[in-house]
Image: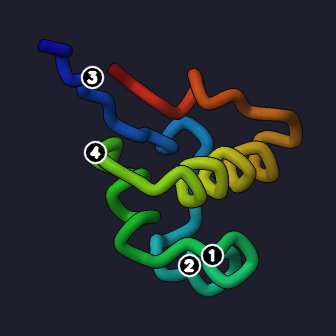
Amino acid sequence: MTAALMATIDISAFWPEAKTVNAVYVEYGPKFGLNAYTLKKAKEGDLESAKMDNLLALRRLCSEWAGREVSLDEIVRS
């Protein structure tokens, strides 16, 4: 039997304080292929599952905000 890996995705450390979920969705959703629900849950640090495409898109979004390459380890919490 294998143990399940429980992890959440949390992008709150990179989220621009002045931006609402809707504002981020309008500006970045189409560019990165992310929906408002995914952005909201990831902002809250409560996104428990995501397709690999979404995970990589969230990493690219955080990298854009940070002005540097953000690693998956920085947004995935176990």
The label on residue 25 is: 2
Circle 1: residue type: Gly
Residue marked by disc 4? 48
Would residue 43 be found to the left or right of residue 13 on screen?
left
Would residue 66 be found to the left or right of residue 4 on screen?
right
Whichever of labels 1 and 4 marks the residue nearer the N terminus, that label is 1
The outermost residue toward the right is 67
Circle 3: residue type: Leu
Mark 1 vs 3: CB contact within 8 A: no
Residue marked by disc 3? 5
Whichever of labels 1 and 3 marks the residue nearer the N terminus, that label is 3
Would residue 64 be found to the left or right of residue 39 on screen?
right
Give the vertical position of 37 relative to 47 (above or below): below
Mark 1 vs 2: CB contact within 8 A: no
Q: Position of residue 22 (x, y in %)?
A: 48, 81
Residue mark closest to the camera, 1 vs 2: 1
Whichever of labels 4 and 3 marks the residue nearer the N terminus, that label is 3
* Label 3 CA crowd tier, 10 Å (few <14, some 14–19, many 20+): few
Whichever of labels 2 and 3 marks the residue nearer the N terminus, that label is 3
SS type, badge 4: loop
* Label 2 CA crowd tier, 10 Å (few <14, some 14–19, many 20+): many
Give the vertical position of 18 relative to 12 (above or below): below
